[in-house]
Structures are given as structure tokens and as C-alpha cells.
Amino acid sequence: MGLALLVATQEPAVASDKPPQAAVASIVPLLTVSGPIGPAAADYIARGLQKAGNDRATLVVLQIDTPGGLDSSTRQIVKDILASTVPVAAWVAPSGARAASAGAYIVYASHVAAMAPGTNLGAATPVQIGGVPGSSQQPQPAPASPAVSQGKASEPKDAAETVGSGADAMTRKIVHDSAAYLRSLAQMRGRNVDWADRAVREGVSLSAQEAHTERVIDFVAADVDQLLAQAHGRTVQMGDGAQRAVDSRGASTALIEPDWRTRVLGIITEPTVAYLLLLLGIYGIYFELTSPGFGVPGVAGSISLLLGMFALQMLSANYAGAALIVLGFAMLVAEAVVPSFGALGIGGTIAFVVGSIMLIDTEAPGFGIPTGLIATVAVVNVLFVLVVFRLALRARKRPVVSGSEELMGASGEILEVTADDAWMRLHSERWRVRSNSPLHAGQRVQVTGREGLVLQVEPTGIAPVEGEAASGPLGASGS
């Protein structure tokens, strides 16, 4: 009886604990991308999706406002979205924003696609940086009625009909590849395949309401609350093929702002900065090769060139970071071997720190390296440079102990004087000398100049032996 009574009194307490647990609202991470899509944006989204997966979030909202970006960064973002363990809702917002070019690919790849009123999407025609020789770089009209069957757009019979008769083979290949890429994303998400093909080939765009009508997006949402409410209950397909229902009812968003690392990379990868870095790198190396020995142009040029290549996606963050770390170490070694009065050492420290920031994710759980450790290593490098710089200054102040410069001002003794020449002993060596003054054997002289193997001397004393004198210029070769 006592045991039964105890159980009966405890059961209501257990049941009463469940409703508060169920009432706890989930947190939906909110990632914001504003501006061109580049390596910094790709890194920010990848880290945000990874964090959302580790936190077991039910949904990730990706707010987009972009005019486009680099193809390599866009494809990396698409891969991260497709491989995400958390559903991603792409939302073109706020009103007045756009998801042009690269943004259209990201919206199509997302599990849920939405736009705020007053926004637009499209214009996904690829354009190469710097232009393509022989092409106008303008989107050309597609066939009047492209064949679309069962959600799959067919390729035109003649590529010139789609991208223009003046476009070269490279342009046609790029356009066809991009069109197929966007169509494949449309087929995966069950969205309008025909319009995806036209967005690439014709560069067309849609407003928010038109995109909803054309089945390019799932719905129109004016704010985050509407987005979460309309996304709730939708069934999406994850990367592993499993179907999952979005659970966002009553959820609240938590903005994940870019950290200092992402902001620094964002400044570097801004198109104007990237262009200037590339030019600075080229000119710096050129000036160092034409005027070697100064050091600063070569150091600044090497670092700027690597950063510019990373910013233009010629090098990935991993390769650029590793190259900068190796470059920094090489400069520190060069500073010790060939002192440059701090130019190589300071440049090596900067390259090491920037490479560490790019290469090492300090927030990766279990694999991060504390920022303080990077700062400590940088301080040690600076101290090393200061020590080497001080030793170089001390060595510069020391008197010359070898070479022709060391002979100037040295004193020795005249060994022999004849009618034709005179010889002196200098540093245990016999030298033939010449002088405008009379010389005597045993006389002390000082070197004032040199012509080949003949030293020009001036007397500093009188020989103790009398009768051995020679006047007039004397000279020959020394041994």
C-alpha cells in the first residue's frame, strides 16, 4: 500500500513536467549575406551551417541581398547547403534587396525559398572577370519556345541560337554549363525548370510575386515571423535522401554575425581591394627585381600577390594561408641570414599572422587554436626581428677587418729601398709601395691608397739607420 501510494503521488508530478519542456521555443540561426558573394561569404555560411548542425537546430534562415559573385564561391555555398544536416530557408530580404546572378543559384539550392515584397531574383547569366575575347558579354535571346518536358529543359540544337552567333566556344560552354547547373537544382527542389534555364540564357529576372506565381520560390514573406510561420510543416528532402518536416512554429531567430576573421577576409575580398592587392603585388615584385637589395617592395609585393590571388579565388583559403605561413617563415630565416634592417622580419611576421587567420579556424570545436597563441608567436617573431636588427647595427659600427677597405689607414714598416722600388711589411705580407716623399728602411709608413698590387704610402717616422734613402716615386707589384 505504501509503495502504491508513493507511485501514485509521483505520477502527476512527472506528467506536469512535460508541458513546460514542450513549450520551450527552438532557436533558428539567422545568417545574413549582403554584398558580393566571395570567399569570405562562403566561409561565413559554411561555418554557420556547421554550427547549426552541431546545435541541432531545426532550421537555418539565410537572408540574401547580393548583386552576384564569384562562381567558385557560389558553388561552394551550394555544396554546403546541399550537404547541410539542417534545412536551409533562403530569404531575399529586406524589401529592395535582390538575389541576382549568384544569389539565384543559392535560392534554388535551398530547401525553402522565400522573398520579401519589393525584391527581385534572376539575371543568372555568367560573365567572366575581364571579359571574354570575341564575345559581347551580353545575354542573348533564347529560342522563342524552349522545349520543356516533365520538368526538364532540352538543350537547343544550335548553341549560337542561344548565346549569340558572335560568342566564342568558351562562352557557349560556360553558359551551357551554368544553365544545366541551375536546372539540376530546380529539378532537385521541384521548382520551375524552364525559368531557371531562361534566367541563365536570357538573363531574365522576376519580382517577388512573379517568382511565387512562376513556382520559382515557395512563398512571399514580409518578415522573419511570416517566414517561420509559412515554412512550418513543409516537407523537404535532405542531402541523404531522407524526408524531413520543418518545425519552426513558435521559434525565435538568433542572428549569427560574422566574426572578426570573416570581416577581415571580407575586406580583402572586396573587388576593388582585391584588384589593388593584385596590382600592388605585381609592381612590388617588379621593383624588387629591377632594384634588388631594398627589400620592402619584394616583401609587400609577395604578401599582396598571395592575398590578391585568394581574393579573386585563384587560390583557396587553405592554399593561400599555407603559402603565407611558409612565406613568413622563409622571410624570418632570410632576416637572420641576410639582415635587411627589419624589412624581411616585419614582413614575415605579417605574412605569418595573416596566413594563420586564413588557414586556422579558431572556433572549430576540438581543432581550434587560441587567438592568443597566434598573437604570442607574432610577438616572439617581432622580438626576434629586433634582436637581429640590433646585431646588424652593432656589426655595421665595427671597424672593417678584411678586404681592400681595411688597408686604408693601416701602418707598416719599410723593409727595403732600392733605386727602383721599395717594399714594406704589412700584416705579415710584403707589399711594393710608392710614395711622393723619401723613404728609408725601417721607417714607419701609413697606407693612403691602392692601385692594383701597389700601395700608396706616406711616412709617419724616420728610420734609425742612416745612409739608406731613396727619393722620388717608387713602385712595382706586391706579393
Image (tube, rainbow, N blue to C red):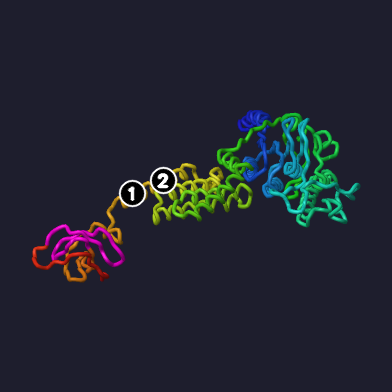
Left or right of 423, for residue 65: right
Query: Is the residue 395 above or below the residue 478 in the image?
Result: above
Label 2 neighbourhood size at 10 Å, few (<14), some (14-19), many (20+)?
some
User: Circle 1 sits in a helix, a strand or a loop, which is it?
Assistant: helix
Amino acid type at image mark 2: Val
Q: Residue furthest front?
A: 472
Residue designated by label 2: 382
Residue 255 magenta-highlighted = no
- The disc, 2 or 1, on the residue closer to the chain's N-terminal end is 2
x 66%, y 29%: residue: 20
In this picture, which residue range is highlighted in magenta?
Answer: 435-462
- Can see residue 367? yes
Residue 101 percent across, percent down from the top left: 74, 43
User: Circle 2 sits in a helix, a strand or a loop, which is it?
Assistant: helix
Quarter of image, res 235 = top right
x 66%, y 34%: residue: 27
User: Which labelled disc corresponds to residue 393?
Assistant: 1
Residue 124 percent across, percent down from the top left: 77, 44
Q: Quadrant of the N terminus?
A: top right
Quarter of image, res 210 = top right
Amino acid type at image mark 1: Leu
Residue 383 percent across, percent down from the top left: 38, 46
Query: Is the residue 27 above or below the residue 77 in the image?
Result: above
How many numbered marks are there? Answer: 2
